[in-house]
C-alpha cells in the first residue's frame, strides 16, 4: 500500500503546483480570501490592532494601508487640485497632503463635526468644523473651488445610510469628470463585516446609483471590486 501511495505521489508531484494555482484562482476561493481578509482586519481592531494601530508620520489614521496605496495611485493618475474629505479624525488628510507635496500640486479640505486641536498643521490642509451635510459647510467647500479646478471627494464621516446618501447628493455634483468620488467603509453591515451595524455606505451608494445615471469607468469598476 505504501509503495502504491509513494508511486502515486511521485507521479503527480510535478503537476501539484499547477493544480494548486488553478484552485486558488477559482473565483469562489478568491471571494473567500477577500471576505476573510475584511473580517480579520476589522475584528483585530477590537483588540486595538489593524486600523486602530496605523500611523502616517506618527499620527493615527483610520484607513487600511492598502487603501492608502490606492489613493496614491489615484492622485498620481488624476491630479486633482482640490480633495474634499468628510470625516477628518486625525491623519487621513495629512496623508493626502503629503502626497500632494510629492506631486507638487493639490490641496485638501477636510470636514469633521468634532474639533480636535491636536490635528496636524499643513499648508495644503484646510480644516472645517461642522456637519459635512450642513448648508454652511457645503457652501464653504463650494467657495474653495476655483474655476476649472479638478475636484475629487472622499466620504468618510458618519457612516449611516441617510447621512452618506445626503453627502453623495451634496458632493457628487462637485466632483470633476475623470476624478474619483470614494465612499469609505462600504464593507460594514455584513458586506462582510459589522453584521448588525444597520444600513450604511453600501446601501447609500446602492440607492444613489439607482437614482442617478452614473457611467462607471472600467477602471473604477475594477478598483471597486
Ligand atoms: C471614520 S472617522 C474618519 C477617518 C479619517 N478619514 C481617516 O482617514 O483617518 C469618522 C469621523 O467622522 C466624524 N463625523 C461624524 N459625523 C460627522 C458629520 N455629520 N459630519 C462630519 N464629520 C462627522 C467623526 O467625528 C470622526 O472623526
Image (cartoon, grey):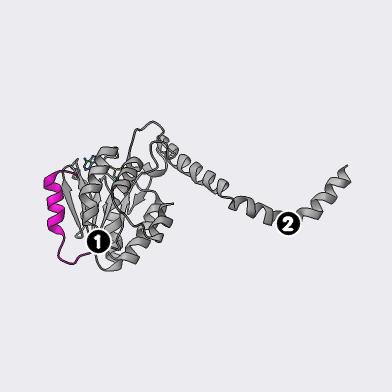
Mark 2 or mark 1: whose residue is earlier in sequence: 2
Report, in whole angstroms, how far the alpha carbon at label 2 lies from the one at label 1: 51 Å
**Which numbered tag is attached to residue 176?**
1
- At a point 75% along the width and 58% down the height, the residue shown is 14
141 drawn magenta:
yes
Q: Secondary structure at mark 1?
A: loop
- In-image side of 169 versus 21 (left or right): left
- Give the residue pinned by disc 2: 15
Q: Is residue 97 above or below residue 206?
A: below
- In this picture, which residue range is highlighted in magenta? 132-151
Mark 1, Cα crowd under 10 Å, few <14 / some 14-19 / many 20+, is some
- In-image side of 112 versus 39 (left or right): left
- At a point 16% along the width and 53% down the height, the residue shown is 141
Q: Is residue 53 above or below residue 149?
A: above
- The percent coordinates of residue 20 (x first, y second) are 66, 52
Mark 2, Cα crowd under 10 Å, few <14 / some 14-19 / many 20+, is few
- The percent coordinates of residue 19 (x first, y second) are 68, 53
- The percent coordinates of residue 154 (x first, y second) are 28, 51
Quarter holding residue 163: top left
Amino acid at each position: 500500500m505504501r509503495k502504491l501511495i509513494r508511486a502515486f505521489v511521485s507521479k503527480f508531484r510535478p503537476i501539484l503546483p499547477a493544480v494548486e494555482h488553478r484552485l486558488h484562482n477559482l473565483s469562489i476561493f478568491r471571494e473567500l480570501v477577500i471576505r476573510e481578509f475584511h473580517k480579520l482586519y476589522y475584528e483585530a481592531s477590537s483588540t486595538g490592532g489593524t486600523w486602530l494601530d496605523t500611523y502616517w508620520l506618527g499620527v493615527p489614521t483610520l484607513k487600511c494601508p492598502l487603501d492608502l496605496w490606492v489613493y496614491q495611485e489615484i492622485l498620481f493618475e488624476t491630479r486633482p487640485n482640490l480633495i474634499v474629505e468628510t470625516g477628518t479624525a486625525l491623519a487621513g488628510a495629512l496623508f493626502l497632503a503629503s502626497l500632494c507635496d510629492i506631486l507638487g500640486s493639490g490641496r485638501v479640505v477636510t470636514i469633521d463635526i468634532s474639533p480636535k486641536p491636536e490635528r496636524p498643521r499643513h499648508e495644503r490642509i484646510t480644516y472645517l468644523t461642522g456637519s459635512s451635510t450642513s448648508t454652511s459647510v457645503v457652501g464653504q467647500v463650494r467657495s474653495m473651488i476655483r474655476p476649472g479646478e479638478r475636484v475629487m471627494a472622499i466620504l468618510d464621516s458618519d457612516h449611516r445610510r441617510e447621512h452618506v446618501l445626503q453627502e453623495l447628493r451634496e458632493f457628487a455634483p462637485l466632483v470633476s469628470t475623470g476624478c474619483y468620488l470614494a465612499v469609505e467603509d462600504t464593507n460594514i453591515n455584513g458586506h462582510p463585516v459589522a453584521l448588525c451595524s444597520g444600513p450604511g455606505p453600501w446601501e447609500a451608494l446602492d440607492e444613489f446609483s439607482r437614482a442617478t445615471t452614473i457611467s462607471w469607468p472600467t477602471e473604477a469598476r475594477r478598483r471597486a471590486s
